[in-house]
Image (tube, coloured by chain):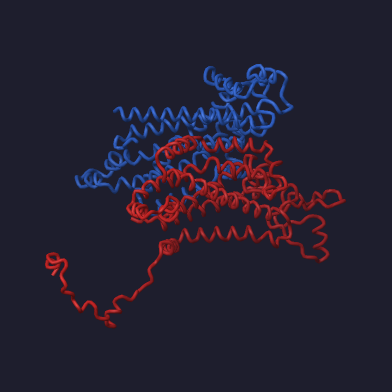
Chain colours: A red, B blue
């Protein structure tokens, strides 16, 4: 049959049967047994099957939600020194309370039958409720980690996709810059920049804007991330784009007259999205790491705002008597970083089809 | 070694030199963004240091000229100027004084991490999915997620304050035990994981099967065939490990009161001793860059299969 067709390509002998309406039996043949899955849904399914990643995700969500919600109803503020009241001498009995101990006036109120909200983790040396400080510290660490990786993502995406797409001189120059920044010892540069930005007039510059509430030290932390950490992201995306742009479908799009920005947005980025998501997710713990490290060295968050790193650093002074004050932020930060890392690994296993051997 | 490899090495050395220069330049100009400049601005400078600095760097001269003087002094005399907080001492002396202790700490930590990491990694790979492998992987995963300052403070709390096994002060050799452990746990865990995965990779390869089919003993396969090749990726970790130990030592020396470079650096930051900050940043950065360079070159030499760019 086939060979005959080849011999007579313009034959008028049409098989009339092919044009009859399909029977019910034939129609059943075409029915979709199962809805086709999208790449995203497939990845989520695989992620949910990974128990470690799911548990880590739940841990992260619980920690994030409690750091957001607990301050709404907690009766103490993170910067409120409980022993200090207007027009009265400072009440020392509030400083360095052990967990579930109360200050002098609070004890009096309890005697009188009033309910006083307990200090779950006691208070610190300035008489501030330690539990709420831990909650705020967690919040700061998560916020810094999240936004820092967003900044890194945006800059890396922009530079990497442009360098990868245009190639040639643009690529050469950007990649030399990337090479140099990449080989800079990042931590030392971060410390240097953080130390200097702390001394500059940044605090005056942002006065009056909404940035003031964020604090100049966090801003300088973000500047540091924006300056240094985009390079590995840019390198990764450039590599992806370089290999993707040689694909046939890009050629096809170009031959139908698609513009550069269209090809980048519609063809290249969707195809390297999984790699981007994974490395952004893995960027968060490393940013949290860096922030706590800097806070520990006294280069991070402005007091009285706590961060997990500065809480651990403050606790070092009273480590002999108040060991738990060090252990709590230590456990929280390790838990956050560990679950983010495990979740990131799970994401990589679920969303990188090239790794599914 | 062929010319292609030589060319690559030269290119890498060029990049390393360029990087160190960028570090010096960035450090210098960033430090001059501080109000009053790095050498001025603080009231506590002793008159002698002030005079020495002014004479040396011509603080009234234009910025670029000061930069050229600073760079020139580093290149020709390895001179980073005097400290503005510690009277009569210059930056290089302070750093070399601290370096003796820090280097001891760092070398022992690196060596320990390497040996224990490779041993644990090999055990985990050879006993894949057995109990011991699981235990090793869980422990190393936990250690990799723990910042060095957390690790250090917890060890301090447990072993020197509660159990009193080691002194909390790092001046004697007993005092160096905990800092060394703190510094080495992260790289050790990383090397363990690295060795495990590369060992598994190597054990799955054809030449191992061939060796086994020939009847080579298990010990010979592991130590004669698999070990050498599975250690190649570990070499690439050489540079990053040193970078980790250097930055880790900043906090570890702080926690355990070890008088090394790291502590001097942190002290210079909190005390705003700018020439010392600049000098320490540059010297430590150069150290890391050089170690990265050595690691890269070693990697290329050890494995002739690796094709150079």
Residue drawn at (39%, 34%) of the image: B296
Left or right of residue A247, residue B23 in this image: right
> How many callouts does the rendering have?
0
Q: Nearer the viewer, residue B76 or A261?
A: A261
- Expressed as whole percent of the image width and height from the top left, the position of residue B11 reads 39, 29
Q: Quadrant of residue B81?
A: top right
Quadrant the C terminus of chain B occupies: top left
- Expressed as whole percent of the image width and height from the top left, the position of residue B25 reads 55, 28
Q: What residue occupies the far right of the structure in this picture?
A: A87
User: Is residue A230 placed above or below A129 in the rendered structure?
Assistant: above
Quadrant the N terminus of chain B occupies: top left
Residue drawn at (39%, 36%) of the image: B235
Residue drawn at (85%, 52%) of the image: A86
User: Is residue A160 placed above or below A257 in the rendered structure?
Assistant: above
- Expressed as whole percent of the image width and height from the top left, the position of residue A138 reads 62, 53
Q: Is residue B192 visible?
A: no
Q: Nearer the viewer, residue A31 or B224?
A: A31
Q: Is residue A74 visible?
A: yes
Q: Quadrant of residue A226?
A: top right
- Expressed as whole percent of the image width and height from the top left, the position of residue A72 reads 69, 61
Q: Nearer the viewer, residue A165 or A310?
A: A165
Q: What residue occupies the far bottom of the structure in this picture?
A: A24
Left or right of residue A56, residue B304 in this image: left
Q: Quadrant of residue B73?
A: top right
Residue drawn at (62%, 26%) of the image: B275
């Amino acid at each position: 049959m086939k060979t005959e067709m080849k011999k007579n390509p313009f034959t008028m002998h049409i098989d009339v049967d092919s044009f009859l309406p399909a029977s019910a039996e034939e129609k059943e043949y075409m029915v979709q047994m199962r809805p086709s899955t999208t790449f995203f849904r497939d990845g989520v399914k695989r992620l949910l099957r990974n128990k470690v990643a799911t548990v880590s995700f739940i841990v992260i969500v619980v920690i994030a939600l409690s750091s957001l919600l607990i301050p709404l109803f907690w009766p103490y503020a993170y910067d409120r020194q409980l022993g200090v009241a207007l027009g009265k001498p400072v009440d020392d009995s509030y400083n360095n309370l052990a967990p579930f101990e109360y200050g002098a006036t609070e004890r009096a109120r309890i005697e009188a039958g009033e309910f006083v909200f307990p200090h779950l983790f006691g208070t610190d040396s300035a008489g501030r409720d330690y539990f709420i400080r831990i909650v705020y510290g967690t919040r700061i660490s998560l916020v810094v980690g999240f936004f820092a990786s967003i900044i890194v993502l945006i800059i890396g995406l922009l530079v990497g996709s442009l360098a990868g797409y245009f190639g040639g001189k643009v690529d050469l120059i950007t990649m030399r810059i990337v090479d140099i920044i990449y080989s800079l010892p990042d931590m030392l540069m971060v410390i240097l920049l953080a130390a200097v930005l702390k001394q500059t007039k940044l605090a005056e510059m942002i006065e009056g804007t909404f940035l003031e509430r964020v604090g100049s030290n966090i801003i300088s932390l973000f500047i540091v991330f924006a300056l240094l950490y985009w390079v590995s992201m840019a390198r990764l995306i450039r590599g992806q784009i370089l290999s993707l742009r040689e694909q046939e479908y890009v050629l096809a799009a170009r031959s139908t007259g698609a513009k550069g920005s269209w090809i980048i947005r519609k063809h290249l980025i969707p195809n390297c999205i999984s790699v981007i998501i994974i490395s952004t997710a893995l960027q968060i713990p490393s940013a949290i790491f860096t922030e706590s490290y800097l806070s520990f060295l006294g280069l991070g968050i402005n007091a009285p705002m706590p961060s997990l790193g500065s809480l651990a650093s403050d606790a070092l002074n009273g480590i002999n008597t108040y060991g738990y004050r060090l252990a709590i932020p230590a456990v929280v930060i390790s838990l956050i970083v560990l679950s983010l890392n495990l979740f990131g690994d799970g994401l990589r296993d679920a969303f990188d089809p090239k790794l599914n051997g | 070694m062929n010319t292609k490899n030589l060319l690559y090495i030269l290119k890498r050395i060029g990049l390393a030199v360029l990087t160190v220069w960028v570090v010096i330049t960035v450090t210098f100009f960033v430090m001059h963004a501080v109000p009053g400049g790095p050498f001025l601005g603080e009231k506590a400078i002793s008159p002698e240091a002030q005079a020495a600095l002014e004479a040396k760097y011509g603080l009234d001269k234009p910025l670029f000229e000061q930069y050229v003087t600073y760079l020139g002094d580093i290149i020709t005399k390895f001179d980073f100027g005097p400290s503005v907080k510690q009277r009569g001492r210059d930056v290089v002396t302070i750093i070399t004084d601290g370096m003796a202790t820090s280097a001891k700490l760092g070398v022992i930590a690196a060596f320990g991490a390497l040996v224990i990491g490779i041993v644990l990694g090999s055990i985990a790979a050879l006993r894949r999915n057995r109990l011991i492998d699981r235990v090793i992987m869980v422990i190393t995963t936990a250690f990799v997620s723990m910042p060095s300052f957390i690790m250090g403070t917890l060890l301090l709390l447990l072993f020197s304050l509660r159990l009193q096994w080691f002194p909390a002060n790092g001046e004697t050799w007993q005092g160096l035990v905990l800092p060394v452990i703190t510094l080495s746990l992260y790289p050790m865990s990383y090397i363990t994981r690295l060795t495990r995965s590369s060992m598994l990779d190597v054990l799955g390869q054809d030449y191992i099967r061939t060796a086994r089919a020939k009847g080579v003993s298990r010990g010979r396969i592991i130590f004669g065939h698999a070990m050498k090749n599975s250690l190649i990726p570990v070499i690439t970790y050489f540079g990053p490990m040193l970078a980790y130990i250097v930055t880790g030592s900043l906090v570890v020396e702080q926690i355990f009161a070890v008088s090394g470079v790291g502590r001097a650096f942190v002290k210079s930051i909190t005390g705003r001793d700018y020439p010392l900050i600049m000098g320490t940043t540059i010297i430590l950065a150069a150290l890391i860059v050089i170690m990265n360079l050595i690691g890269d070159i070693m990697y290329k030499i050890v494995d002739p299969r690796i094709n150079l760019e």
